[in-house]
Structure formats: structure tokens, C-alpha cells
Amino acid sequence: MDTNKKAETKSSSIDDIDKKIHANQVLYDQLHQSLVDEIVSKDDEAQKKEKSRKSDVSKTRNFLLKFSDYYQSNELFRYALWGFVAVFFSTTILTIIEYPLFSGSVKDDVGDGFMFGGDEPNWVDTFFHTFWWAVVTFTTVGYGDVSPETHLGKFLTIIIMILNLGIVTMLTGAVSSVLVAARLKGDDTLDETKFYGHLIIAGWNPAVQSALRLIEANEDSASVVILINETEEEIIKRAVSGFDRLDITHLSENFTQEGVLKKAFIEECGTFMIVPDESGLLPNEKPDEDKTVLTALTAKSILEDIQVVAYILDEEYISHLHRANVNEIVFPDEHIPHMLAKHVTDPGVPQLFDELITQEKQDKGIQVVSIPKGLVGLTHNKVSAYYKFKHKWLLVGYAIKKAGFSLEEQMGESGSPIIRDMIKEQLDGAGIKLSSDEHVIVEINPDDEYIIDGKHKALVLR
Amino acid sequence: MGVNAKQIQKINYFSKVSEDLCSEIAKVVKQKKCSPKTTLLKEGEAGDTMLLIFQGQVEVSKNMMVKTSSGFTMSTKSIIRLETTDPSPANKPITEPTVSVVKAPAFGIGEFSLVLDNAKRTSHVTAMTDINYGIIKLEDFSNIVDKHPSIGGSVYFEVAKSAVNNLATATQDISNLTQAFFFALAK
């Protein structure tokens, strides 16, 4: 009897709790929905503002900037432009100085043909006539049908002809140098306009193809890829034939050389990846991993800021790569003990790991997404609610870009200046840099009150 | 001949001591002069005197192991230069300073000797210009303090203050050096 009663009250209390939870759930959902709405509207506003600001930047300014860039970079264009300016300038001067002569000879030359001025040549006819003279002179054709007659006109023509000699010579030189350069470089030169923030993979390895397939699947990642390795063209072509989104270029050269890396626009690249190179190896031969370290050093010496990811098979090289300031090191063997042990201690964990990491579909698995601006400065539980309610994603943690550690900044003005100077001097002398590169750290499942700043990116499970 | 109370008061350790008492101290200060390159204090030597630099520039240096192109060698490394401003040095220093120059009306150096018996000198002090200075013995100073205990309080307070400041800087130096050490090892 007693026990029956107890059971009854128990079930009724569970019902109660369910009811309460249900009532609160609605409130909870509403609260979070309003939060999401607020954040989304804030974000939209911010984006709109940015857009309108961008369109405000005048188009003429943009055009001028492009023009000056082109002028700086293209020798041929530069000389041609100056040639044109010189022709136009001399035409104007001669039209003014020798007006009677040129306007007189217009009638002789044109005869009954069309003239802008009708029966008598006007200034347009004269100007065009003089322009004809200038071009005939400049191109060194020199028909001699028109020529200046007064001393002043002839004197000016002398100056113009001598100036012209210089410009024409340089123009000719530029044309031939462009042609020669094009022939020397052959098909090797890559179109530099498309290479910015691209991925460079130095070395060839079966893992590369699989990695590319995963990169292909994520539409937010960079689409331009350069492969540098000396594997046969045929093999590479076959391996990369299946990719639609990725634009893959193959450079068949030795990637340890600085010149080759520069040809791949390494200064502009988003990520530089070095993998154990199996080019030209027999099946049982091991790749030479010294090359990986050497390449990392070369890349970092070209530009310290390059994001270098190195894939290494032999543990021995890890310290060398650290010393070369490589940003990230991928050493697959380090996961093996954990995977093996977890199969014994926590069955299911390795499977979860496999499932998460080997997802190839774009909208599944663990991914890094940027956090909307409206969420910056809020706490973890709010950000987590945002992803849950807006996208139905589970927020697992954050990837945070940590600025490099700088000894100089750390020391600041503390202690005696003599000691600080000595430290700087001695480390510099030993070739040790006073700062380390920025790197990415992860914060998994932080406290609810954890504050998100602009350096955070969300790790979500979709 | 002799040192006056005003000169004594310019030194920060004695700044809180009244002029009357300063003249008491001045009586036991032995005034001296020296030319450039003279070594006033030698690192490691025991000493029971404090030097009062009234005019001139001195260089403080320490024996240190330094790395040169031919390897490690012991050498004297300058740490700081002290220069008086009231009056300023009578002539130019014999070498251009390679370290920072700290300026004050006048300086007291070897102040540890006022606290410790037979304190060891912690660094070399070398004259860079003609120097006008005075020497005060621990024994004489103690006698004055016995007679006028108020002197002791203010002087020892100033000495303690500078010792504490130095200690704070030294602690920071150690932390900087430790960081640099780890930094160098990590590479």
C-alpha cells in the first residue's frame, strides 16, 4: 500500500517536472530565438554599412590606382605611352608654330578629298595633317610629303627627332625583351593574378590526393592549388583529374630551391604544405625527410610570415622543424598509441574520432566557422545557443589565433636597460629571433561564462 | 680646505639630514681629488669607506664572461655612468659613454659600507673625468650616529630605499634572463 502511494506520487512529480520543463522550454526557446534574431539583425546591419562604405570609394580613384600599377609593372606600356605623349606634344607645338605652312600644305595634299573645314582647311584638318607628319617622322618612315620650313620649326623638329630616337630605341628594346622573356620562360610562368592565398603542396605522396579530395569538399577553402614535385606528369594528371572546384597546377621542379618556390608565388600563398616526397622512389624506398626540413627553412627565409604546415614520418625531424619555425607539424604516428589504448579503455571513442575526422561531405563533421560579429564579446553559452538554434550545430569549442610570443614585448621596460640590451644583443648575435610566430590553439568545451573575442573561430559539429 | 654641509646635502642619502648635522658629517669627510682613469673602487675588495662624488663622471663596471668572436673571455663590462650636475664635470670624459649616463647633483657610492662591516665592493668604479670627491669612514660615521641618532634613521632609510629598489630591479632582471634563457633553449 505504502509503496504504491510512493510510486504514485513519484510518477505525478515526474509529470509535474515534465510539465514545468515543457512550459520553460517554450520560454527558453523564445528567449534564445530573440537573441538569435537580435544578433542576426545586428550582423546584417554591420554588413550593409560595410557595403555602402565600399561603394563610396570613388571609381576614378580605383581606375587611377590600377592604371599606375599597370604603368609600373609593364615596361612596354610605359614606353608606348611616352611615345604617344611625345607624338601628341610635338604635333601640338608644330601646329601652333607652323600653322600657315601645315594648313597650306593640307590643300595641296588632300586636293578635292573630304575636309573638316569644307573648302578651306580649318584647325582640325591642320592638326590632323601635322599629326600625320609627326607619326611619319616618329616611325622613321619619313615620306617627306610634309616638312617644316621655318628655322624655328626645323629647330624644334631636330629636338623632337633626337628625342624620338631615344624613345623608339627603348620601345623597340622593350618589345624585343618582352618577346625574348616570353620565349625563355616558355609555358612555365604562371599567371600571377590568380595566385593569392593559394595552397602550395611541395612533394608528392598518396596522402596528397586524399587531402585534396577533402579540401575540394569544403567550398569555403581556397580553390587554387600548386603542386611542386618531380613525379611524372602522367601520374599527377591522373591523380588530379577528378577535381572540379580545385584549380590545380603542377610545377615539375625541385621544391627545395628558392627560385622554384618563388615561381609558385610563395610570398602570396595562404598555406605552404610540405609532405614526404615519394617522387621517383621505388615502392620500398623511404622518402628523404631532410628535404622537408630544408624546404621549411627556405620558405621561412623567403618570408617569415608564410604559414607552413609540415607532414613528417620520422619523429627525429620534429625538433628540426620546430627550430625552422614551422607553424604546424603533422606527425601521424603520435595518434596511434591513443587510438590503440582507447579501443581497450573507452571503446567507441576511436570510432567517433574516425567518424568525425574522415567525413568527406561538405556539410558534415567537425568544421571551423567564423563567428558573426554580433556575437563577439558575448559569453560561450550565448554563442552556443546561437549555433544550436540558428543552424542546429553543436558548438564543440573554439580555434583561437594566438599572437606570437615576443620576448621584447614581454620584458617591456622592466629590469635594468643594460640587461635587456644584453639579452637582445646576445640572442641576435646567436641568430635567435626575439619573437615566435602566431599559431592556432583550441579551447574545448569552455565554461558558460567564457568570453568570445574577435580572434575566436567556432569549432562546430554539423 | 674641507667639505661644507651643502655639498653633503646634495647626496640623496643625506638629503633628509639637517644642515647642522651635515656639517658634523662634513667634518669627518676627507676631501680628495683624482685624475681620469683612476680606479676609485675595485670589485671584490673589502672596504670600510663610502665615497662621495661631488664633481665629475665615473663609470661603474663589472667583471663578466662575455662572448666575442674568438669565444668566451672574462672582460670588464661597463654597466652605467654616473655624472654630477651641481657642479657638472670640469672636463669632458676620456671616452664616449657606451652605456646610459645617470645624472644627479652628487653621488654616494659604496653605501653598503655604511651598513656592513668590511663589505665587499660589488663593482669597479673608474674616474672618467677629473673627480672631486670625499671619503667617509664607517667608524667615523658610526660615531656621529651614536651622538645624533636622528641622522642614522634618515640615512639608513635612504640606503634601505635604494637597496630595495635595486633588489626589485634585480628580481626583474632575473625574470627577464630566465625568460630569455628558456627562449634560447627552445630554439
Image (cartoon, helix red, strand yellow):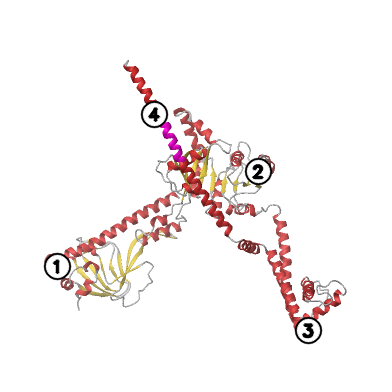
* Disc 4: host chain: A
Q: CA distance from mark 4 to mark 3?
A: 111 Å
Measure the alpha-carbon separation of dots 4 and 1.
86 Å
Q: Chain of mark 3?
A: A
The number of numbered badges drawn on the structure is: 4
The answer to whether marks 2 and 3 mark residues whose Cβ atoms lie closer than 8 Å is: no
Q: Which mark is residue A17?
A: 4
The disc, 4 or 2, on the residue closer to the chain's N-terminal end is: 4
Per the image, the residue denoted by label 1 is: B144
Q: Are marks 1 and 2 on the same chain?
A: no
Q: Earlier in the sequence, mark 4 or mark 3?
A: 4
| Closer to the camera in the image, B94 or A293 | A293
* Residue projecting furthest to the left: B147
Say whether residue A371 is visible.
no
Q: Quadrant of residue A358?
A: top right
- Helix or strand or loop: what does disc 1 sit on? helix
Is the stretch drawn in magenta largely helix, strand or loop?
helix
Q: Are marks 2 and 3 on the same chain?
A: yes
Check the residue under mark 2 and report the chain it is in: A
Left or right of B75 in this view: A134: right
Q: Are marks 4 and 3 on the same chain?
A: yes
Check disc 2: other Cα within 10 Å, few if <14, some if 14-19, many if 20+.
Answer: many
